[in-house]
Amino acid sequence: MNRFKLIAGAIAVSGLSLAFAPKPVATNSVGSNDKIELPDNIKAIVEAKCMGCHKPDARNEKAREKLQWVKVPEMNLEEQEDFVAEMFEVIEEGEMPPERTVERRPEMKLTAEENAAFIAWLEKEEKRLKGE
Ligand code: HEC
């Protein structure tokens, strides 16, 4: 086989493999069945530092009305978008748990690590919602 044939063969083979390469999948289609998932590390933080006020039988009516963690896995896409946006706000601003609570019980404040874990999780959910 001469040099030319070798090169031509190599081009033909690489052309062939390109033709059979999987087509990129359209990514901007968020399925309506897609739900928010709480990974274990986030679940643990929520249980320890958020759930007390945001559960169905919580004493604080306002907190109960504003956010119910038990409903998060059932949210439709619109609710998920609102949830993620709101959650970004309170976590980035350090608004939750409320200041009054943290003053009385400093151990309720999210640690820097917990904060970072929360943000990483929210960024992941945001990407999924944007279809990225
Ligand atoms: C000590 C009780 C308490 C704890 C603990 C608590 N919250 Fe809240 N949360 C509230 C109250 C009260 C409101 C309503 C605030 C308002 O409307 O002024 C609220 C509102 C919210 C809202 C809605 C904000 C808005 O602007 O409507 C989000 C989101 C939220 N909390 C997230 C969290 C997260 C995340 C945690 C845990 C890191 C947490 N909360 C822990 C009492 C609590």
Image (spheres, rainbow, N blue to C red):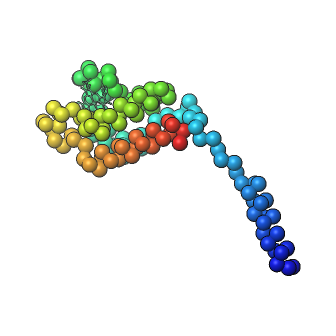
Q: In screen coordinates, is 82 left or right of 96? A: right
- The relative height of residue 81 versus residue 45 in the rendered view (above or below) is above
Residue lying at 30% horizontally and 46% vertically, measured from the top left: 114
Above or below, 28 relative to 41:
above
The residue depicted at 16 percent of the width and 41 percent of the height is: 106
- The quarter of the picture where residue 93 lies is top left
Residue 37 visible somewhere in the drawing: no
Residue 17, horizontal then vertical, whole percent: 75, 59
Give the residue displayed 46% in from the left and 35% down from the top: 36
To which quarter of the image does residue 28 belong? Answer: top right
| Residue 70 visible, this angle | yes
Q: Seen in the image, is 11 located left or right of residue 74? A: right
Residue 124 x, y percent position in the rendering:
45, 43
- Which residue in the rendered view is the most extreme toward the left? 104
Foreground residue, 73 or 14? 14
Picture coordinates of residue 101 (x, y %)?
17, 33
